[in-house]
Image: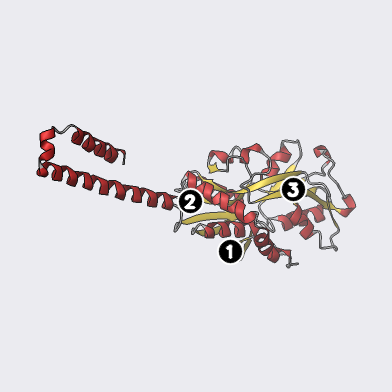
Amino acid sequence: MRNVVQVLDSELHMLNYIEPRNLMNNQTLKRFAARYSVWCILLSLMLVFSAYSGGVSANSAEGKVISICSDANYWFPYTFNENGVSKGLHVDLVKNALAKLGISAVIEPLPWKRCLFSAKKGRYDAVISASYKQERAEYLYYPEDAALGGVSMQRLTQVEYTILTLKSNAFDFDGGFSKIPEPVRVPLGYSIADDLSKKGLFVKTSTKGIYNSLRNLVNQRAGSIVTTKDIAVLVAKDTSIGLHVSSVPIKSKSYFIAFSKKTALTDSERVEIWNNIAAVRDDAALMSTLLAPYGKDDEVPVN
C-alpha cells in the first residue's frame, strides 16, 4: 500500500511542474486525471482489503480441527477415561473455549507418559492437562506466566495435592516433608512425584491408577498416597476402608492445555485459546453448570 501512496504523490508532483502552456491542453489534463483516478481506486480497494484481513486475523483459527490427547488415568474430576472417551472438567473447559472460537477438537485419552511423548513427536497438537515443568517446556508451549510457579491467569484450574493415609496411621501435613509416611504412591508421569523424590522421599509410581494404589495401601498397611484433594475426598467416602485425608495440602499447582511445539497453530492462536479458557473459567454460571455432573456420588470404578 505504501507503493500506491508514493505513486499518487508522484502524480501530483508531476502536475505541479507541468509547463503553464500544457495546462491549456485538454488532452494532457484528461490523461493525468484518468491516471490519478485509477490510482485512487486502487488505494481504496487496498484499504478495504486491509480492514477485512485485520478482521479475519482476529480469529484466524476458526474452522480448524486440532488433535488433543488427555490423561487416561482416573484423575477425577479433571481428566479420566470413560469407555474410551476423554471426560472431566478440564476436557469440558477446553471444549467450551474452543467452541467459542469455532475450533473443533478430536480428543483421545492416553496413558499420561504416552500422551506427552506423542505430543513431543507432533502426533497431537496439545495435551490436557499439564503442570509446568522445565523439561516439558522444551517440547510444549505454555502460557508466559506458567514458569513463575504461582496461580497462572491462563490456567485451566488450580489443583491442590494432599496426602491420603489409613485412619490407623492418620497423618496431617505440617510442612515437614520428611514426616510423610513412605512409600509415597503417585501415578507414573505426574510432576508431583519428581517434587517428592527431590525431597528425599521413597516414591512408588504406577500406571494403574488411584484404586490400585489404594489396594496396595490397604494390603500393606503402610505408606501413603499423594493425590488431588478432590480424589482423596472421593475415595475417603468409602467408610468401610477407614481413610484419612490430610487437612493441609502439600502443594498447589496451575494446570494447562499445553501445545506441542510441532503444532501448526500460531502464537496468536494459542494465546487466543488460553484467553478463552480463562474467560470460561471466570464465568461463574457456566462453571457451575460444568461442575454439576461431577458433584454426584458416582460408583467407584473397578480397575
Q: Which residue is mark 1?
A: 84
Q: Which residue is mark 3?
A: 161
Q: Nearer the viewer, mark 3 or mark 1?
A: 3
- Quadrant of the image containing the C terminus: bottom right
- Residues under labels 3 and 1: Cα distance? 26 Å
Q: Residues within 10 Å of mark 1 (few under 14, many from 20)?
A: few
Three-letter amino acid code at the position of disc 2: Arg
Q: Residues within 10 Å of mark 2 (few under 14, many from 20)?
A: some
Q: Which residue is mark 2?
A: 123
Is 181 left, or right, of 74 in this rendering?
Answer: right
Three-letter amino acid code at the position of disc 1: Gly
Q: Examine the rendered structure and indicate whether residue 110 appears above or below residue 295.
A: above
Residues 264 and 299: in front is 264
Residue drawn 63% across the image and 48% down it: 155
- Which mark identifies residue 112? none
- Residues under labels 2 and 3: Cα distance? 30 Å
Is 31 left, or right, of 72 in this rendering?
Answer: left
Is 3 left, or right, of 188 in this rendering?
Answer: left
Residue drawn 58% across the image and 64% down it: 84
Residues 190 and 103: in front is 103
